[in-house]
Image (cartoon, rainbow, N blue to C red):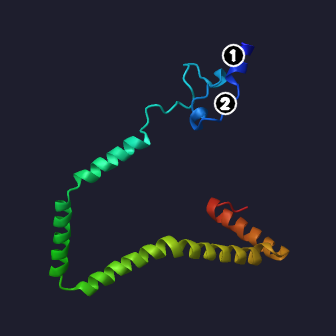
Amino acid sequence: MLATAAAALRPVPLRRPGALLRAPVPRSLLDSRGAAPFPRRTASLKISQLQLTAARFSKESDSAEDDELLSELREKWDAMENKPSLLLYGGGAIFALWISFVVLPGLLELVGLGYSGWFVYRYLLFQENRKELANNFDALKKRITGDDE
């Protein structure tokens, strides 16, 4: 038993990059069914298979289809009468996305920091204000629970 534990914990040579993936799993990590907690990924796709799939999809896309799509888009653009309004709406949509993802989180964080600073200054910094906060909290508890002690 000691020999198997020592064999399971032998150092893995780092000469080959994939040596760590083929390292034996110690018996202590095996569960009752005998399966490793982290199964090896022998059936996963390889990079060459992904490249082959991407090449196959790019060859299926015919240039005639691309030309047809572009010509259809040009026709729709030329048929549109009110192009400035479309550009205005599109620019407004992009600006709204920029505001919502870039500016708004920082602005809300700044508002939260400002309110937290005000709350600390107003209620927690001085002793008489802390007593006022405790009294307000007790009054709120009494209003919610209906206790008239």
Amino acid type of the residue tagged 2 in the rendering: Val
Give the residue displayed 69% in from the left and 73% down from the top: 116
The residue nearer to you, when weighing 142 against 112, is: 112
Q: Quadrant of residue 93?
A: bottom left
The residue nearer to you, when weighing 29 against 15, is: 15
Marks 2/1: CA–CA distance: 16 Å
Seen in the picture, residue 119 relative to 65 is either above or below; the reply is below
Q: Which mark is residue 4?
A: 1
Q: Is residue 101 left or right of residue 10?
A: left
Q: Earlier in the sequence, mark 2 or mark 1?
A: 1
Residue 130 x, y percent position in the rendering: 79, 71
Decide: few, some or many residues near mark 1? Use Cα within 10 Å; few <14, some 14-19, many ≥20: few
Give the residue displayed 69% in from the left and 20% down from the top: 7
Amino acid type of the residue tagged 1 in the rendering: Thr
Give the residue displayed 28% in from the left and 53% down from the top: 58
Decide: few, some or many residues near mark 2? Use Cα within 10 Å; few <14, some 14-19, many ≥20: few
Q: Quadrant of the C terminus?
A: bottom right
Q: Quadrant of the N terminus?
A: top right
Secondary element type, mark 1:
helix
The residue nearer to you, when weighing 80 against 120, is: 80
User: Quick one: which residue is furthest to the right in this view?
Assistant: 127
Front: mark 2 or 1: 2
Residue 54 x, y percent position in the rendering: 33, 49
Q: Quadrant of residue 106?
A: bottom right
Q: Is residue 138 left or right of residue 57?
A: right
Q: Which mark is residue 12?
A: 2
